[in-house]
Structures are given as C-alpha cells and as structure tokens.
Amino acid sequence: MKLVQLLIIICCAVSSTFSQDTTLHHSLADTTVGFSKTGRFTLPEVMVRTNFNYEKLLQQIKEDTTFYKAFRNLRVLGYSAYNDIQMKDKTGNTIASLYSKITQNYVNGCRTMDVLEEKTTGDFYNKKHQYNYLTPELYAALFFTKGTVCGENNIVKGHEFSTSAKSGIDKHKEQLKMLFFNPGKKIAGIPFIGNKLDLYDEKAHKLYDYRLDIQEYHHQLCYVFTITPKEDLTASQRDDVVVDEMVTWFNTNTLEVQGRRYILSYKAGVYDFDVSMEVEMTHYKNLLVPAILRYKGNWDVIFKKRERAVFTATLFDFK
C-alpha cells in the first residue's frame, strides 16, 4: 500500500470525529485536471494535511474506464442472473412484470443464454411475445443475449459508442448505453440535454459542486467522488441541470469502480424523465464484474405512453 494511503487510513481511524472539511478554490485551468476557476472541490482535512495529490486522482477519475470494462467482462464469462422488472401505474401499482432466471454460457469464444425460469404478469408481452414496453426492450438490449454471439472481447481501448448510422430503437439503445456506461459525458443526438450531461466542462463547474472523500464501502476502503448541483442556482441555471446526484466509490489501491449511484431528471417540451440507477461491483478472479443493478424510472416521450418502471438484476455464479 502506498505511504499516503496508509497515512490516510491511520488519520481517518484516529481523528475522524475531529476532522473538518476544506473547500478549495483553486484555479485549475493550467493543471492536468482541466477544471476552470469556477471548479470547487471539497476535501476532508486529512487529505489536505497529507499533501494528497488530489489533482492527479481527479484526472484518473475523469478518464475512468473500469466501470465500462466491468460490463464488457460479461461478454467473455458465463454467469447466472435473476431479473425482476416491474411496470407501474401512476399510483405505484404493478401493471405488468417479468421475473426470470437466466444462465449465460460462454464456450469456445461464443456466448448463448438459457432461460431457466420466467414468470410474467399483465401485458408485459404482446401476442407475438414482443415487449409491450420500451423500458424492458432497452433492458434486454443491455443484458440479454439473443441467439449465438461469437468473436467478442472485453477490450475497452479503441471502443467508442456512436449513434451515427443508427436510427429508431437502435439509436435509443446506443444512447442508453452511453448514458449508462459513461455518465457525466455529453451524448450527441438527445434533444435539449446532450451537452448538459457533460459534468466536466467549464459550464458545468458553475452548476455543480464536487466532493472527494474517503469511506468504507462493502468492507473496502474507497475514495468517494460526489457531484451535486450547487444550492444557490438561479431558475435559469436549474434548467441546465440534468444530474441531481452522482456518487462513485473507487478502490483506493486499484482505482477500480466499486459502486456508482446516479439520479437524473429533466423536463422539456417533448419529453421528461426522473430516473435513478445504482450498480454494485464484485470480482471474479481478477476481473471486475457487476453484481447488482437497480433502476427506478418515470419518463414520457411524445407519441409514447408514459412508463414507470423498477428493475433489479442480480448476477452471480460467474465462470
């Protein structure tokens, strides 16, 4: 363990009840972090006293690929999963649902999926066994394997999401992947909010506060990076806020993402949404993989029925 990490652990253990937070108002325009004068970071006192190199850490956080890598690892593994999807009405009652247990098989570079158990209620499927709702269709695009898929890998470098040459549901699926795997980065092609999703440009620094801390997360010491809107925003500035909260836990030794929670909401003339997502990670041998995914969402798009959904995916028995 690095010396500075050891010092942080010791200081946190003996003086956590006396620690105070320090808010830094540095001009970071000329550093590798790339934040402007308006960028504001709140650090625990222990980080300041140990001369912790927070600028380098923030840059690594900004460029993180471990979160996306964990999901790409699912392309080269077998595993089992429980899927629980519930569609709700405006009073919170379940109007359609799916509960299933699936197993993904990975043999000779190819993956397939077996449905071991499935129960549905309401109009979850239509007569052709197609999804009646867009939320589970997008869910299936992320987590279900259809047929036999071969020749994939878990390499992240050089793999970029793009909506070019895509339209309709395929474009929405790609945008969902971008939002899910790269939260905090702008997404082209989403009307009114594509650029507002970028949490790292100069405009965002006028809207959000950034906090770096240290916490224990599932028995693992982690750096915690939290982004929340500033409390003193004007009405017009609030209209530019899409991310109500994003919290990410990073392993202090490896800087791998151990967990992430984010809440997004926005109202425009043609659509509105209010969604929260949470992901908890685990390890299979030396590979980081998602263990639990939780989602709760309420959204409406013009020409579509409003959808209110809750889902949980639990992954286990990796091999």
Image (cartoon, rainbow, N blue to C red):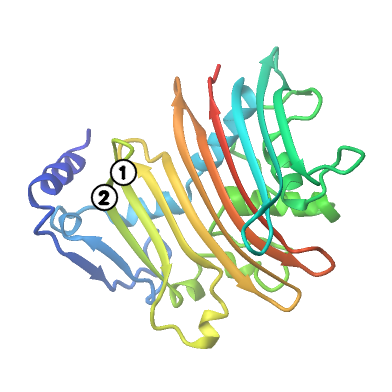
Question: What residue is drawn where x is 18% and y is 59%?
Answer: 48
Residue type, numbered disc 2:
Ile
Q: Residue furthest top?
A: 108
Question: What residue is drawn where x is 91% and y is 40%?
Answer: 127
C-alpha distance separating marks 2 and 1? 6 Å
| Residue sitting nearer the eye, 179 or 271 | 271
Residue type, numbered disc 1:
Cys
Q: Secondary structure at mark 1?
A: strand
Quadrant of image for the N terminus: top left
Q: Position of residue 315 (x, y in %)?
A: 55, 30
Number of numbered discs: 2
Is the residue under label 1 in contact with that under label 2 (CB below 8 Å)?
yes
| Residue 167 shows in this picture | no
**Vertical arrangement, residue 239 with respect to residue 4, above or below:** below
Q: Which residue is mark 2?
A: 214
Q: Which residue is mark 1?
A: 222
User: Quadrant of the rendered structure where residue 42 is?
Assistant: bottom left
Q: Is 215 on the left or on the right of 154, as rendered?
A: left
